[in-house]
Image (cartoon, rainbow, N blue to C red):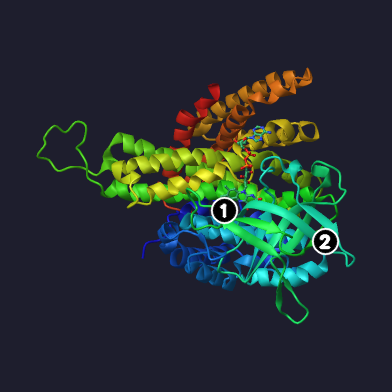
Amino acid sequence: MKRTYIDMNDIRFLLFEVHGIEELTRHPRFAHVGGREEIELLLQTARDIADREMFPFYKEMDSQPVVYRDGGVRTHPQLRNIFRAVADAGWFAATTDFEDGGIQLPYTLFSTAHMIFEAANNSAQGYLGVSTGAIDLITTFGSEELKKTFVPPMMEGRWQGTMALTEPQAGSSLSDIRSTARPTPDGAFHISGQKIFISAGEHEACDNFIHLTLARIEGAPAGTKGISLFLIPKFLPSAEGDLVYNHVECVADFQKMGQRGYATTHLVFGETGPTVGYLVGEAHRGLACMFQMMNAARIAVGQTAAAIASAAYHYSLNYARERPQGRHILEKDPLKPQIPIIRHADIRRMLLAQKCFIEGSFSLVTECLKLVDLEKISEGEDQRRARLLLELLTPIVKTYPSEEGIRSVSQALQIFGGYGYTMDFDAQQYYRDIRIMAIYEGTTGIQSLDLLGRKVGMESGKALEYLAREISKVVEAAAQYEDLLPYAHRLQSAVSIWQSVLSHLQGFAGRGQLDRYLADANLFLELSSLVVMGWQWLKMGVTASGQWTGGRSLPTAFYQGKLQSMRYFFKYELPRIHS
Ligand SMILES: Cc1cc2nc3c(=O)[nH]c(=O)nc-3n(C[C@H](O)[C@H](O)[C@H](O)COP(=O)(O)OP(=O)(O)OC[C@H]3O[C@@H](n4cnc5c(N)ncnc54)[C@H](O)[C@@H]3O)c2cc1C
């Protein structure tokens, strides 16, 4: 059986050695999880589902894509089996508290399992991820009644949750949302309007669809301050246990260049009859609530991009080992057999570039996942630190893996030569699939404005201060190793450049020239990403060096490879900050 293209040793290294998941599992909230052995077992269940139920259908879900036919969305039959397997293993209930019927796992662990699903079949994983996000949102902000009615069938994988924000005139600009909610005497609302591009908005693997929807209560103020969050089921559960149609029409499925196994729907509310919606959280505070799901989804997008790139990397690595072509550059004898292309320097360069990008991205993702948990379990200054760091890193963890992932998968495709461009090989599918990552959940342009326009100045620059402190800690640790010292210096000098660019830009903001301040926000995000990745790479370098000299748990070659990738980052990638 062909297995999901992901290196479990990378996951072990990040969870147990670099980011110390034990810090979480020692906390009373997560103490039931157990130690390394139990965590490995849990991840193995995810790996088994990925290998058996998802990966073998990756290509087929693309060649037999989602279609809108006979008034409904038609999906691949395997989707049902995937929902069953994931629900039976408890992954839909993974992060929910015990008191709400969940398993209360650390978010870090849950999301790492999803990373394995994403590497196996990112279209299939999309349905699962959005449903879990919806469960989290309802359990955090919903009334007891809503939780009791809607969460259990979602945790059993029978009902699908979605996030319904986008409208034709309100994509990046959510303040322009027009869907409306009219109060009804029983405390509910009648919703009217339309939502486009709604992922998993309808398919054949679930019986009901629970749309977490942004809309305006009639008479609400304009802009983001007038937006509320509603739970809108496609079918209303009656007291007798029947499902009654709630006039949520799915009128189309968008045909896309990638993620063709993942439904992207057009929904209409209140057109053929009244559509009932229930308020979640306080009126007019909907966007603030929705940000919980959006922030989680932003990390998940970065993670998916890294996972797709990982799959493409391993796929291209296998090919490079098997494909004979040409001879060594110094070999002039045409009668000598051809060598596998992995022995050509340019192929090795492309493989190393991918490895460096993927491992760095996975590390940043794991850093952010742990911050999600730390924010939940810590208090006081520690909690503030976790919250602000996470806010600051979110646009970066969404964007760096997405943008650089496109570059990385392009290198994977290049390794296949002409075959990479054909439909017979999967390289083109990874390339098509990864392209959306820089677009949904806030485009790169929007993430850049978020970073420079909001995050760096947040709470008088406190988030930046925390980040600078984290980087200094790693630089100091690296200084203990002679081999790492030059890289510690390079990172320190990159931080200085970054800080001077920021203070130069802030001069424009200080003079009221906000447009000029933000004009190159995209480049500032790129610069910030390289500094942040330098931090992650040095952290991995310190860990790999420490393990090497101490009690290593992974093969020596693994740590050597890690240090080699680190050197590649510092020599070939970090210097891009100078432009
Ligand atoms: C496959 C797919 C799945 C999706 N899933 C969901 C989902 O489940 N739920 C959901 O609600 N939505 C979903 N979306 C919608 C997605 O989030 C939006 O497409 C995205 O936010 C961009 O909005 P838009 O398409 O209207 O583009 P626009 O907002 O029109 O943007 C067009 C371009 O203009 C730039 N731009 C826009 N405003 C500014 C600005 N102020 N400053 C600088 N540049 C700007 C953008 O960066 C972009 O390059 C999905 C989309 C796709 C394609």
Neighbourhood count class around disc 1 (C-alpha, 10 Å): few under 14, some 14–19, many 20 upward: many
**355 lies above or below 522:** below
Query: Which quadrant of the picture is home to ligand 1?
Result: top right
Q: Residue at x 45, y 34 (%)?
A: 567
Q: Which residue lies most toward the front here?
A: 272
Residue type for callout 2: Phe
Give coordinates of residue 511: x percent, y percent: 78, 17
Q: Residue at x 55, y 58 (%)?
A: 263
Residue type for callout 1: Leu
Q: Which residue lies most toward the right here?
A: 185
**354 lies above or below 304:** above
The answer to whether mark 1 and mark 2 are in CB contact below 8 A is no
Identify residue for label 1.
15
Q: Nearer the viewer, residue 368 or 27?
A: 368
Give coordinates of residue 240: x percent, y percent: 75, 82
Between circles 1 and 2, the one closer to the viewer is 2
Identify residue for label 2.
189
Q: Nearer the viewer, residue 456 or 189?
A: 189
